[in-house]
Amino acid sequence: MAVSTESAGGVFHGGHLRVDQSTQAALEAATVMLVRDATSLEVFLLERHIDSDFVGGAWVFPGGKVDESDTRLSSAVLAGHPPPALVEQVGDRPATALCVAAIRETFEESGVLLARTGTGPVTAGDLRSDSYLSARQKLADRHSKWNWSGWLEDEGLQLDLSALVWWSWWVTPIGVNRRFDTKFFVATLPEDQVAEHDNIETTNSRWESPAMALQAAKSGSASIILPTRKNLRQLAGYANTASIMVAGTDPGFARPRIEPRLIIGEEGQVSVDHESFDHPEPV
């Protein structure tokens, strides 16, 4: 991937990645790979707004950083438990916050809400109501700092932590201007819900088989960054959602912490390498 250099600041711009000389700390983040069974296994992808300050224009899964409010939701609006492997790795409270962030960001960016009401699962009708649409808009407004805890209680909602399966763990390389310590989760699309982009942070969306998404990345018709591609390659090995959920909940399922090393070539090409890779790969 060719990049240009700003010599004064030592900044490289490589497609959708901004690389500099700082060593920003990685922020805790969560991403959700929504999957469904169609003619083949499909995963939901969003195209980030081209002006986004992180991977603008790239196709990604719903997700974002953990907010402070995610750490203090009342137990009354939570149902189920975080994935046991995640609790073992980071502790119960951080694991719960990661799951809350994953569900919140998925609702905000895709309109899918992994939650239960007093009468059963959240439905498409619920999601089309003024109350739910307003809540999604408020969450998307980064200036409002809206805490949705009260709304969840008013609507009799409980976030379904058990709907999430922890799948992988990726950390942005040192040297990138925005770094995230990201837990990737898998969740099955609830039966009576529809996923769609928000037209704010994301401008397009599509359901695609992992293999077709990877082919689009290879052909250049879609920009997909390395962690997304790697996760798609893993998902491509499964025939349906059930097999993914079984694999992800197996106590022996491996989720190594992957923090690639950034490589800037002599001609400005940006790539990354890690001990688990066969060779350096473009970002």
Image (tube, rainbow, N blue to C red):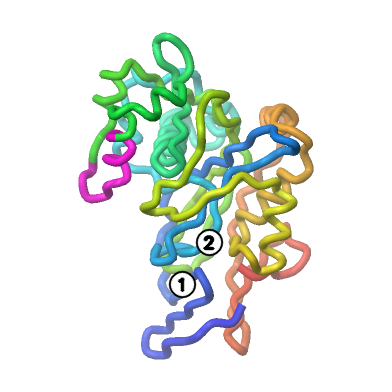
- Say which residue appears at 71% left-offset and 67% top-offset: 219
Give the structural element (helix, strand or loop) at label 1.
strand
- Say which residue appears at 78% left-offset and 43% top-offset: 237
- Say which residue appears at 61% left-offset and 44% top-offset: 207
> Quarter of the image containing the C terminus?
bottom right
Above or below: residue 116 compared with residue 215: above
Using the image, tell me which numbered label, if any, was put on residue 49: none
- Residue 94: tell me if it is visible: no
Q: As drawn, is 6 to the left or to the right of 258?
A: left
Find residue 235 and report its image quarter: top right
- Say which residue appears at 66% left-offset and 47% top-offset: 208
Q: Which amino acid does label 1 sit on?
A: Arg
Disc 2 crowd rating (10 Å Cα; few below 14, some 14-19, many 20+) is many
- Magenta region, residue range: 134-145
Q: As drawn, is 210 to the left or to the right of 62?
A: right
Disc 1 crowd rating (10 Å Cα; few below 14, some 14-19, many 20+) is some
Q: Nearer the viewer, residue 67 or 45?
A: 45
Find residue 146 and report its image quarter: top left
Q: Position of residue 131 (x, y in %)?
A: 28, 27
Q: What residue type is labelled 2?
A: Ala
Using the image, tell me which numbered label, if any, was put on residue 18: 1
| First of labels 1, 2 by sequence position | 1
Q: As drawn, is 158 to the left or to the right of 228?
A: left
Q: Where is residue 164 in the image (x, y as percent from the top left)?
A: 55, 30
Q: Where is residue 179 in the image (x, y as percent from the top left)?
A: 45, 60
Mark 1 near mark 2, Cβ–Cβ under 8 Å?
no
Q: Nearer the viewer, residue 50 or 55?
A: 50
Give the structural element (helix, strand or loop) at label 2.
loop
Q: Position of residue 245 (x, y in %)?
A: 68, 29
* Numbered label tally: 2
Using the image, tell me which numbered label, if any, was put on residue 58: 2
